[in-house]
Image (tube, rainbow, N blue to C red):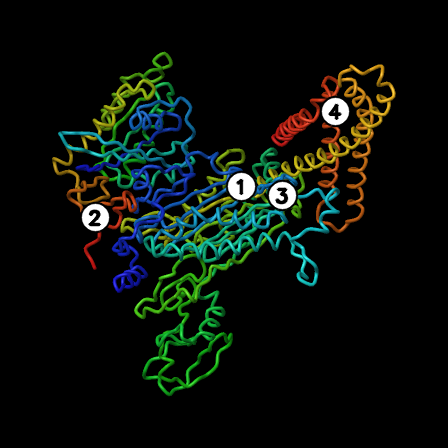
């Protein structure tokens, strides 16, 4: 027991000694699967602390949407790369198949400390937990057929009587809730494992979820997600400039004009930024500080000779400063000390949210640190359907943005705006290449890592300043590519809903026809006794076809008028008229295309086979359309 | 698998000359006609025997495209051997050798053994660079020369093994300081107790430092 305690204590300050406790690893060390570093030799070569090779995926098709990734190991502070990254694509389905599916994509980046265990566990397990949480509320998340479903929603069991449940919970809140509870669950899971497996240490977590046309970024710790955007104009102006090729104007090449700008989608959680929360914990539970710490901050570190003197300080959660007479208790170590990147909680830890660290003890004092930490993430959301992007400007990447998720290895030495500038520089350098986002990721890592000088120090290339000696991991996500995928999926989805609705209507009508026919047939029963069923089928066909035709025309008009209505009704909406008109015509085209495909099919198909063949036709029509659309985009 | 020495190699040369294919042929004994562009760096490893000693080759296969040059340069560091590859069916890849050589000499340690390789010797009908030209270039710059074919595997083994032999000889002559890892040579496990067994591999991860407590 004492040994165990001692080992845990040691592991807090010297992770490499933690191998002294003989518990096994829960997961064997490795790099993210999409890098395909499969052998021990490759792992060892990639962990070369002297060269710090920049690793990118061998097969670019493993990540969706051409998403870029690059990483590089630290300069020797830990033997293995303690960062981890993960992604996962999943589909939420209704077990009863009442609603269409809802696909989602998740990316995660985890920066480990005091060992690689926690980050590794998160990269292996987080997506399963998140999936569970999303499935939990999938009944409320799945897209539904509002036309047919209105009646049912009244009896929806998840919205009980107002006296029990007064708030209407939005989809947004459900997804944010799923993310939050997944964070807590992940932390709990690591806690459960600590008695069976080697001390996992801790890790930060920065997670992005793309679902239902929106982007959710959840962050706990000091990794960061920054959305890099670019105002329209730069790219277009530059290509015009190139075509005119006026040598006098090359000096003011608009390519050099930096039109990019970053938006942070996460806030770092360090002892400095979380000072108020930490002080509150200390104030409410002073016993957590033992006899060693004080919830106080001094302008100047007090010395024993200052006893009885008045010194400038701020107590607890105060924002301003005031004087106080120094007593013996005030000589204890402040709960939070240091500034910026150097700020430390209990003189030990530089990050205040994340997973793990359940056994972490403060240096020298052995005070438990975990009570001050929390896995609770901040979640920020971006609704991509609100993005304004004018097709003629070809600035989709700039309008929708490129999401850069990276561990502090990048952010310690790179400002947000420099990152967004570099991203767009690289994208314009590689305008068409499949690996353009990977190049951006690689460039960001290369710059942050810098070069090693003769005395063995890593320096930034453009200055003498120190480069990062930490592990660096960077994910570069083209958000527009997700949105495009989402739109395609929604179209298919709408079509699927329409198909179901129409089929229901047809079934009703066919039933009526059959009934009518039966009446007639009953009258002539004595003549046609031995006739096969095909007669009935034929009659159905005759009656059903014109009806469908009518139905379809009605629907076309309906779609059009509906869209027109929205146009008129929401003049203040952000979406530009052009884009909206495009959607309307697109929808119309689809409906027409579908109708045509179906009509041709019906001419030479037996009615009995219709149900199945409609499905196949719809899908093949979808494919055709997608192909066309793809070609259109390329042009 | 224990080894007496580990040598780090780097493969360099223009894009499309067959660097990745040479590596694949040497490590996996197979040829892949269509190979994706190498964007970063890829690693291969194989054990060979020289003078009755087990030697592990750790090979870094780099991206050849000009755009990647600045990143690739940092990988010369700590390489004991380099394979400088050109394509005998493309004259310009031969013309660029001087630039590659300058780069290599500037960023590597001076003892690095460089082997010049004219690849695609199976495509003799489309040959643009004569074997004699390769030999002459090698002689002029003090390199070892060989023509190989990653497709037929001709001379591929020899290229890697002869380079290793040369490095091994330099070690015997005392030219390389084998205690300085920056030279791209590592002494095998029997001499260095710190040599890593991967943690978790076979559950032996913790055994290395188990001296304390």
Residue that badge 2 annotates: B194
The chain that hosts pointer 1 is A
Name the side, left or right, on which A78 lies relative to A230: left
Residue A130, percent from left and from top: 51, 49
Residue that badge 1 annotates: A90
Give the structural element (helix, strand or loop) at label 3. Answer: loop
Q: Residues within 10 Å of mark 1 (few under 14, many from 20)?
A: few
Give the structural element (helix, strand or loop) at label 4. Answer: helix
Whether marks 4 and 1 lie on the same chain: yes
Spatial CA span between label 2 and label 4: 73 Å
Q: Nearer the viewer, residue B203 or A247?
A: B203
Spatial CA span between label 1 and label 3: 37 Å
Closer mark to the observer between disc 2 and disc 1 = 1
Q: Residues within 10 Å of mark 2 (few under 14, many from 20)?
A: few
Spatial CA span between label 4 and label 1: 34 Å
Counting residues from the N terminus, which is met first, the one under dot 4 or under dot 1? 1
Residue that badge 3 annotates: A233
Spatial CA span between label 3 and label 2: 57 Å
């Amino acid at each position: 027991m004492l040994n165990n305690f001692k080992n845990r204590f040691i592991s807090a300050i010297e992770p490499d000694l933690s191998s002294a406790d003989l518990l096994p690893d829960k997961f064997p060390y490795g790099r993210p699967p999409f890098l395909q570093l499969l052998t021990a030799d490759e792992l060892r070569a990639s962990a070369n602390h002297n060269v710090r090779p920049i690793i990118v995926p061998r097969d670019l098709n493993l990540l969706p949407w051409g998403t870029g990734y690059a990483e590089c190991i630290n300069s020797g502070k830990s033997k293995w790369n303690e960062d981890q990254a993960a992604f996962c694509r999943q589909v939420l389905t209704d077990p009863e198949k009442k609603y269409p599916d809802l696909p989602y994509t998740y990316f995660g980046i985890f920066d480990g400390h005091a060992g690689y265990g926690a980050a590794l566990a998160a990269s292996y397990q987080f997506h399963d937990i998140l999936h569970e949480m999303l499935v939990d509320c999938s009944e409320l998340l799945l897209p539904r057929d509002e036309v047919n479903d209105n009646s049912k929603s009244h009896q929806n069991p998840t919205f009980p009587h107002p006296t029990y449940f007064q708030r209407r919970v939005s989809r947004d809140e459900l997804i944010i809730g799923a993310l939050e509870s997944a964070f807590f669950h992940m932390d709990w899971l690591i806690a459960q494992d600590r008695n069976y497996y080697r001390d996992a240490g801790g890790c930060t977590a920065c997670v992005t979820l793309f679902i239902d046309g929106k982007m959710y970024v959840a962050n706990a710790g000091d990794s960061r997600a920054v959305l890099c955007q670019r105002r329209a104009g730069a790219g277009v102006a530059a290509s015009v400039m190139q075509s005119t090729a006026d040598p006098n104007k090359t000096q003011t090449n608009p390519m050099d004009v930096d039109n990019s700008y970053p938006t942070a989608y996460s806030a770092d959680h360090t002892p400095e930024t979380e000072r108020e929360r930490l002080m509150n914990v200390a104030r409410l539970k002073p016993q957590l500080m033992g006899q060693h710490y004080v919830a106080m901050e001094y302008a100047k570190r007090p010395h024993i000779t200052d006893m009885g003197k008045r010194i400038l300080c701020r107590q607890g959660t105060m924002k301003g400063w005031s004087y106080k007479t120094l007593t013996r208790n005030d000589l204890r170590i402040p709960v939070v000390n240091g500034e910026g990147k150097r700020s430390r909680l209990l003189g030990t830890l530089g990050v205040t949210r994340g997973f793990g660290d359940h056994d972490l003890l403060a240096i020298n004092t052995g005070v438990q640190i975990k009570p001050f930490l929390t896995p609770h993430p901040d979640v920020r959301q971006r609704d991509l359907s609100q993005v304004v992007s004018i097709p003629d400007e070809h600035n989709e990447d700039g309008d929708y943005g490129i999401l850069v998720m990276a561990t502090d290895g990048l952010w310690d030495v790179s400002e947000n705006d420099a990152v967004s500038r570099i991203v767009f520089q690289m994208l314009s350098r590689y305008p068409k290449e499949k690996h353009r986002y990977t190049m951006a990721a690689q460039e960001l890592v290369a710059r942050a890592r810098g070069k090693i000088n003769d005395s063995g120090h890593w320096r930034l290339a453009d200055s003498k300043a120190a480069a990062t000696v930490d592990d660096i991991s960077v994910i570069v996500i083209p958000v527009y590519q997700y949105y495009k995928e989402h739109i395609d999926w929604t179209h298919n989805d709408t079509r699927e809903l329409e198909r179901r609705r129409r089929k229901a209507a047809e079934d009703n009508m066919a039933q009526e026809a059959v009934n009518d026919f039966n009446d007639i047939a009953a009258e002539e029963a004595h003549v046609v006794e031995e006739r096969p069923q095909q007669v009935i089928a034929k009659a159905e066909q005759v009656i059903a076809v014109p009806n469908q035709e009518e139905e379809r025309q009605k629907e076309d008009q309906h779609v059009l008028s509906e869209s027109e209505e929205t146009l008129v009704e929401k003049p203040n909406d952000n979406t530009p008229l052009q884009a909206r008109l495009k959607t309307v015509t697109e929808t119309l085209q689809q409906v027409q295309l579908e109708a045509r495909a179906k009509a041709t099919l019906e001419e030479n198909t037996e009615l009995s086979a219709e149900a199945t063949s409609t499905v196949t036709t719809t899908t093949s029509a979808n494919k055709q359309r997608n192909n066309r659309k793809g070609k259109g985009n390329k042009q | 698998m224990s080894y007496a020495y580990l040598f780090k190699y780097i493969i360099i040369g223009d894009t499309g000359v067959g660097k990745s294919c040479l590596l694949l042929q040497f490590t996996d004994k197979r040829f892949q006609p269509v190979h994706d562009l190498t964007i970063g760096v890829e690693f291969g490893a194989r054990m060979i025997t020289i003078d009755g000693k087990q030697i592990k080759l750790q090979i870094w296969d780099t991206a050849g495209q000009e755009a990647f040059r600045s990143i690739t340069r940092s990988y010369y560091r700590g390489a004991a051997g380099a394979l400088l590859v050109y394509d005998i069916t493309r004259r310009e890849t031969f013309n660029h050798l001087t630039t590659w050589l300058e780069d290599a000499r500037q960023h590597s340690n001076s003892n690095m053994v460089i082997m010049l390789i004219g690849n695609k010797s199976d495509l003799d009908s489309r040959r643009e660079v004569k074997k004699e030209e390769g030999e002459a270039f090698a002689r002029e710059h003090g390199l070892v020369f060989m023509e190989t074919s990653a497709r037929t595997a001709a001379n591929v083994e020899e290229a890697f093994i002869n380079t290793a032999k040369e490095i091994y000889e330099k070690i015997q002559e005392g030219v390389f300081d084998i205690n300085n890892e920056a030279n791209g040579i590592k002494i095998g496990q029997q001499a260095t107790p710190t040599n890593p067994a991967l943690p978790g591999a076979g559950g032996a991860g913790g055994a290395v430092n188990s001296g304390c407590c």
